[in-house]
Amino acid sequence: MGATVEIDSVTKFFGEGADEVHALGPASLSVEAGEFVSLLGPSGCGKSTLMLMIAGLLDRTDGEIRVGGKSVDAPRTDVGIMFQDNTLVPWRTVEGNVELQLELRGLEPADYRQRIAELIKSVHLQGFEQRHPYELSGGMQQRAAFCQALVHKPETVLLDEPLGKLDAMTRELIRADLQTLWMDTRPTVIFVTHSIEEAVQLSSRVCVITPRPGRIERILEIDLPRPRDLEVKSSPEFTAYTREIQAIFHGYGVI
């Protein structure tokens, strides 16, 4: 089970004086252990900035962030993190790239052999363990990156638009993989996206963020059965959620 994440009146400014930009906040949010929460908003609203602050990779201007009850004051090695552009290194195989994440954390890959094999199988990459990234499609590379993010069994997983550069069919396949991985171990997932359908299909709750400076305008509980396959997207309930969110963004003038 994952860790709690508490965001308390967090703000972020970039620059100084006449060049100062108010990027985010104040924003407050409490994420329960094992939740799958999406941060949904237009480009430039600060959602990725908030994720980087949760990971300890970016200082906040004001407010406090706590993960598992501990204040985030430095980069955290106990989270899993994945970006739109994967972090696979070209000179390592799929298996080697997954092992690299363990090595960077001072963990012994030999102790995680079964974990690595199970993850690779769960995202349908068995048989490609010894292939290099240039031998894989974009979707396969992202699957390998999911394995990287999850191999050390993190309680908190931060995903920054990991499906943003994939074609529609591949996105749907990897959404299913991601949902399965989350349902199997229930880490706390914070998922950054600008896709309304993606947020509704995957999330326990969707946090709608305003245009810059980003504030959490609305939090929607998504009450849909799991696993959420393609059929759920044609349900009246799914349509109602997406239309409600579309109406919010229409009010912002971004749709």
Image (cartoon, grey):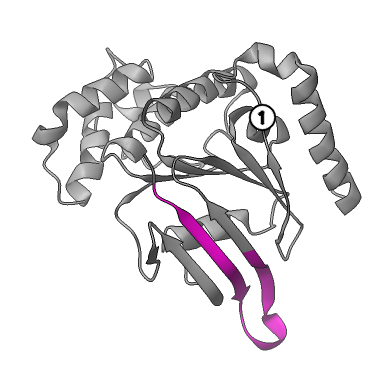
Q: Would residue 146 be found to the left or right of residue 199 on screen?
A: left
Residue 182 picture location, percent across and down: 44, 30
Measuring 31% from the left and 17% from the top, which residue is drawn there?
121
- Principal SS element in the magenta part? strand
Q: Quadrant of residue 29?
A: bottom right
Looking at the picture, does residue 37 appear above or below residue 64? Answer: above
Q: Is residue 7 magenta?
A: yes
Looking at the picture, does residue 20 appear above or below residue 253? Answer: below
Q: Which residue is mark 1?
A: 223
Q: Would residue 96 be found to the left or right of residue 190 on screen?
A: left
- Work out whether residue 255 can be spotted: no
Residue 238 picture location, percent across and down: 74, 24
193, 94: nearer the viewer: 193
Quadrant in which the N terminus appears: top left
Under mark 1, the amino acid is: Asp
Measuring 64% from the left and 64% from the top, which residue is drawn there?
27
Number of callouts in the render? 1
Q: What span is colored magenta in the figure? A: 3-27
Residue 196 picture location, percent across and down: 72, 35
Disc 1, SS: loop
Measuring 38% from the left and 71% from the top, which residue is drawn there?
73
Quadrant in which the C terminus appears: top right
Q: Is residue 48 magenta?
A: no
Measuring 47% from the left and 59% from the top, which residue is drawn there?
54
Q: Residue furthest bottom?
A: 17
Mark 1 nearby-residue class (10 Å; few <14, some 14–19, many ≥20): few
- Work out whether residue 35 can be spotted: yes
